[in-house]
């Protein structure tokens, strides 16, 4: 399966290269092998994996709620400045924190205008719908996935 995911990731990189949003989501539930797959891909491509939770949490911790909302886009821009594509994001759960008052998918899409981004997405993809968390959970998100390049781990 790892070889198949690697092939799909390589194909996806080529497929989105000229797209408006150069974003690839590797979607699967916790424990499905997303991190292992992107580690292998990152090793092959000789690029670093950015742990978004770790990269953002220290800075956001010292800010007020309102400052976090305002600073998130700036912090993300600073994080990717001077980095070359593809950028690989793992552990993106912090983007779903409801106190940040942002739309995680739109945040990733905005960043993918200038960089090819591969991100793990802890959720499901079924019947054209991309989900994060379970319905009723305060971080639940559901998106129409028709214009998103998705590689499902299932």
Image: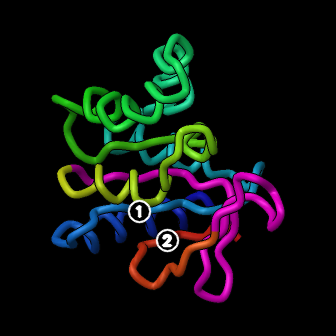
Q: Quadrant of the N terminus?
A: bottom right
Residue 133 location, x and y as percent?
74, 58
Q: What residue is drawn where x is 55% and y is 27%?
A: 65
Name the residue tied to disc 2.
150
- Looking at the image, the residue that sits furthest to the bottom is 127
Residue 73's place in the image compared with 126, above or below, is above
Q: Nearer the viewer, residue 120 or 72?
A: 72
State which tag comes first along the sequence, 2 or 1: 1
Q: Position of residue 77 (x, y in %)?
A: 26, 35
Task: Tell me, for residue 24, which label it has, or none.
Answer: 1
Q: Residue 29 in the image: x percent, y percent?
A: 74, 58
Is 120 colored magenta in this rendering?
yes
Pointer 2 with pointer 1, Cβ within 8 A = yes
| Residue drawn at point x = 49 percent, y = 71 percent | 150
Label 2: how many Cα within 10 Å (few below 14, some 14–19, many 20+): many
The residue range painted magenta reads 115-141
Element class at badge 2: strand
Q: In this view of the protein, which residue sits in the foreground, 97 or 11?
A: 97
User: What secondary structure is marked by label 1?
Assistant: strand
Q: Which residue is at a point 67% across and 60% down the rendered structure image?
A: 132
């Amino acid at each position: 399966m790892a070889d198949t995911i690697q092939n799909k990731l390589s194909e996806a990189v080529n497929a989105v290269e000229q797209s408006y949003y150069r974003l690839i989501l590797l979607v699967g539930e916790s424990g499905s092998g997303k991190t292992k797959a992107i580690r292998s891909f990152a090793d092959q491509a000789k690029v670093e994996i950015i742990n978004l939770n770790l990269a953002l949490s220290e800075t956001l911790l010292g800010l007020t709620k309102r400052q976090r909302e305002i600073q998130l886009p700036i912090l993300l821009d600073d994080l990717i400045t001077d980095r070359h594509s593809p950028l690989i994001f793992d552990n993106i759960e912090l983007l779903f924190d409801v106190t940040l008052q942002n739309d995680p998918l739109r945040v990733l899409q905005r960043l993918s205008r200038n960089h090819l981004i591969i991100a793990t997405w802890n959720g499901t993809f079924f019947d054209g719908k991309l989900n994060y968390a379970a319905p009723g959970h305060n971080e639940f998100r559901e998106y129409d996935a028709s214009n998103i390049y998705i590689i499902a781990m299932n």
